[in-house]
């Protein structure tokens, strides 16, 4: 059993996005139709650009599956860019005969300047095409594959919008948001009134030629105790989750559980009381609260894993900021290319994918197995060992 890992390739306006996933056990049921749901959810959300009406993302399985089940060999996916038809000359692979129209107007907040300096480019398009959040469509496809694996073990991953701009959702009284209401909301917020205010905030930003960021939250339920490890820094699961969510385009902050809010509370109100067995409600080692976000010492503790991402406003503005030309150094207005006003709702779907990927990696690291039945057998044997040491069967 090899480590579960993935690679993506492709540019925003190129022919498409290619994904290779290695390390999946054989025998996992998987279809293109299953992945399509998450890809559609990523394209939704109020505040998206017109490109989402052009692209109808579909992940084509081109290797690694036969008759609806994984083979244990690398899985290969391809997501075609429908907008490629309008960019064939600009993004052609073959040498271009003629003068290339270069992008030299640098955008503050984007990878334009740093990427051009790093790689020695005189055309920012060489950077912006790969730095684009279009790449997250590939990650969402991988996340859907990992979600399919996690489902086999009763693990579910959801997300919702916590805030957009200065509009915050009301906290839920029962811990878990109404996920059905989240998916019906145009901004993926369970609260109807907060959703309306968020939509209005996006409209105001659009009219002003501006953009908005916000906070999105992922929750994974059914996660067993014992994923991750305390023994080395790079094996701590909270660190791996933070890296995964921080890698999403425009994310500038990540917190787990109570996060930054815990810094202003005394220790007596910052930790999760361990309940006695009669209050476990069917799963071992329940807690009275979940301020730790399901992780202690880099290890899952059996409570839901809760991770939030802070998304800055998008750096491509329809009313561009002042900037400088890459070639001449002349003061100009930053480059503008069709863009979103707000992507917080979509970022939650990408966040789900990244959390699902990390949890699937950790599950396979702990339980192994070259085929699904073997992984399940190892998982079930481990679950039987949980509980007070003097009361195990």
Image: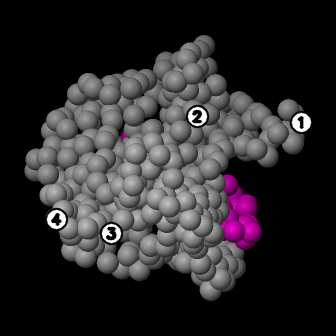
Q: CA distance from mark 4 to mark 2?
A: 50 Å
Q: Nearer the viewer, mark 4 or mark 1?
A: 4
The span from disc 3 to disc 4 (Cα, nearest Å) is 12 Å
Say above or below: 375 vs 89: above
Element type where label 3 sits in the image: loop
User: In front: mark 2 or mark 1?
Assistant: 2
Are the residues at dot 4 and dot 2 in contact (C-beta closer than 8 Å)? no
Q: Position of residue 112 (x, y in %)?
A: 48, 56
Name the N-terminal-most of marks 2 and 1.
2
* Residue 45, horizontal then vertical, whole percent: 50, 73
Q: Residue at x 57, y 32 (%)?
A: 239
Number of residues whose C-alpha sits closer than 10 Å to that of mark 4, classed few (under 14), some (14–19) or many (20 or more): few
Q: Mark 3 = which residue?
A: 101
**Left or right: 279, with 146 as reference point:** right
Point out residue 54 in the picture as x, y percentages from the top left corner. 32, 78
Q: How far apart are the two marked residues, 2 and 1, measured between alpha carbons?
A: 22 Å
Q: Residue at (57%, 72%) from the top-left corner?
A: 333
379 or 237: which is nearer to us?
237
Q: Which residues are magenta?
A: 152-176
- Report the residue marked by disc 2: 238
Q: Which residue is mark 4?
A: 97
Residue indicated by mark 1? 266
Residue 201 visible in the snapshot: yes
- Label 2 crowd bin: few (<14), some (14–19), many (20+), radius 10 Å: many
Is label 1 in a helix, a strand or a loop? loop
Q: Is residue 345 visible?
A: no
Q: Find out whether the residues at labels 4 and 1 contact each other: C-beta distance under 8 Å.
A: no
């Amino acid at each position: 059993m090899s480590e579960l890992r993935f690679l993506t390739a492709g540019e925003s306006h190129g022919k498409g996005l290619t994904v290779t996933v290695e390390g999946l056990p054989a025998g996992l049921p998987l279809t293109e139709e299953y992945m399509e749901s998450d890809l559609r959810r990523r394209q939704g959300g109020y505040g998206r650009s017109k490109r989402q009406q052009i692209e109808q993302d579909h992940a084509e399985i081109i290797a690694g599956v036969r008759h609806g089940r994984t083979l244990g060999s690398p899985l290969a996916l391809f997501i075609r860019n429908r907008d490629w038809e309008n960019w064939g000359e600009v993004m052609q692979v073959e040498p271009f005969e003629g003068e290339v129209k270069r992008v030299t107007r640098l955008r503050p907040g984007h990878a334009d300047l740093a990427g051009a300096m790093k790689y020695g480019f005189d055309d920012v398009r060489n950077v912006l095409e790969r730095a684009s959040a279009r790449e997250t469509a590939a990650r969402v496809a991988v996340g859907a594959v990992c979600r399919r694996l996690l489902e086999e073990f009763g693990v579910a991953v959801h997300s919702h919008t916590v805030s957009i701009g200065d509009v915050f959702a009301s906290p839920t009284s029962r811990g878990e948001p109404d996920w059905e209401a989240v998916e019906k909301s145009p901004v993926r917020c369970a609260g109807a009134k907060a959703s309306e205010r968020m939509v209005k905030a996006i409209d105001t930003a659009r009219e002003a030629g501006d953009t908005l960021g916000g906070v999105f939250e992922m929750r994974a339920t059914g996660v067993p105790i014992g994923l991750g490890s305390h023994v080395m820094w790079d094996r701590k699961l909270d660190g791996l989750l933070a890296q995964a969510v921080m890698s999403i385009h425009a994310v500038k902050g990540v917190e787990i559980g109570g996060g930054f809010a815990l810094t202003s509370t005394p220790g007596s109100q910052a930790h999760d009381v361990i309940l006695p067995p009669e209050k476990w409600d069917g799963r071992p080692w329940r807690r009275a609260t979940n301020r730790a976000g399901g992780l202690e010492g880099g290890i899952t503790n059996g409570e839901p894993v809760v991770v939030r991402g802070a998304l800055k406003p998008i750096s491509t503005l329809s009313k561009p900021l002042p900037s400088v030309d890459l070639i001449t150094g002349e003061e100009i207005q930053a480059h503008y290319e069709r863009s979103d006003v707000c992507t917080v709702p979509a970022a939650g779907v990408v966040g789900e994918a990244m959390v699902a990927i990390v949890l699937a990696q950790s599950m396979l690291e702990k339980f192994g197995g070259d085929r699904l039945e073997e992984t399940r057998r190892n998982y079930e044997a481990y679950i039987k060992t949980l509980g007070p040491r003097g009361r195990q069967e």
